[in-house]
Amino acid sequence: MSRPKRPMIKFTCKVCGEIFYSNRDRAKYCSISCANKGRKKSTDLKKEEKIKEAVSRENNMKSIKEIAVHAKNAGISYGEYVAMTEVV
Ligand SMILES: [Zn+2]
C-alpha cells in the first residue's frame, strides 16, 4: 500500500512574493536561495535591534553626563540634582 500523497498548498514567498506550491504544512520560501535570504534578513533585524539597544544605552550615558554638568552649574552634587528632579 502506498502512502497517501499530501495535498499541495498554495503559499506566497516571504522574500520575493512569488506564489508557489508545497506539500509542507508551513512553507515560507519558494526556493532555497529565498530561504537563505529570509533567514539572513531575520538575523539582520536582530542585529539592528541590538545596535538600537546600544545606542539608547549610550544616550542614557550622555544624559547622565549632561545632568552632571547641570548639577555642577547649579553648584550642587549630581546626587542632589537627581534627588531634586525626581521629586514631583
Ligand atoms: Zn522566493
Image (tube, helix red, strand yellow):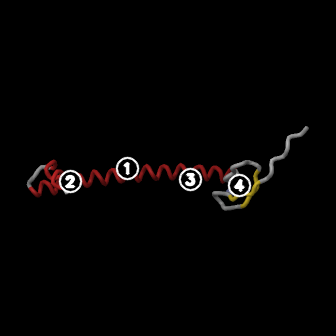
Q: Alpha carbon of mark 1 to alpha carbon of mark 2: how far?
A: 25 Å
Q: Nearer the viewer, mark 3 or mark 2?
A: 2
Sequence order check, earlier mark of 3 and 2: 3
Q: Amino acid at mark 4?
A: Cys
User: Circle 4 sits on which residue?
Assistant: 30
Sequence order check, earlier mark of 4 and 1: 4
Q: Mark 1 packing: few (<14 Cα in 10 Å), some, or many (20+)?
A: few
Q: Mark 3 packing: few (<14 Cα in 10 Å), some, or many (20+)?
A: few
Q: Nearer the viewer, mark 2 or mark 4?
A: 2
Q: Amino acid at mark 2?
A: Glu
Q: Alpha carbon of mark 3 to alpha carbon of mark 2: how far?
A: 42 Å
In the rendering, at what x and y percent does residue 17 appear? 67, 62
User: Circle 3 sits on which residue?
Assistant: 41
Sequence order check, earlier mark of 1 and 3: 3
Q: Quadrant of the N terminus?
A: top right
Q: Are marks 1 and 3 in contact (CB under 8 Å)?
A: no
User: Circle 2 sits on which residue?
Assistant: 86
Q: Amino acid at mark 1?
A: Ala
20 lies left or right of 3:
left
Q: Ligand 1: does it lie within 8 Å of the C-beta at label 1?
A: no
Residue depicted at x 20% and y 53%: 86
Sequence order check, earlier mark of 4 and 3: 4
Which disc, if any, is residue 54? 1
Residue depicted at x 13% and y 50%: 80
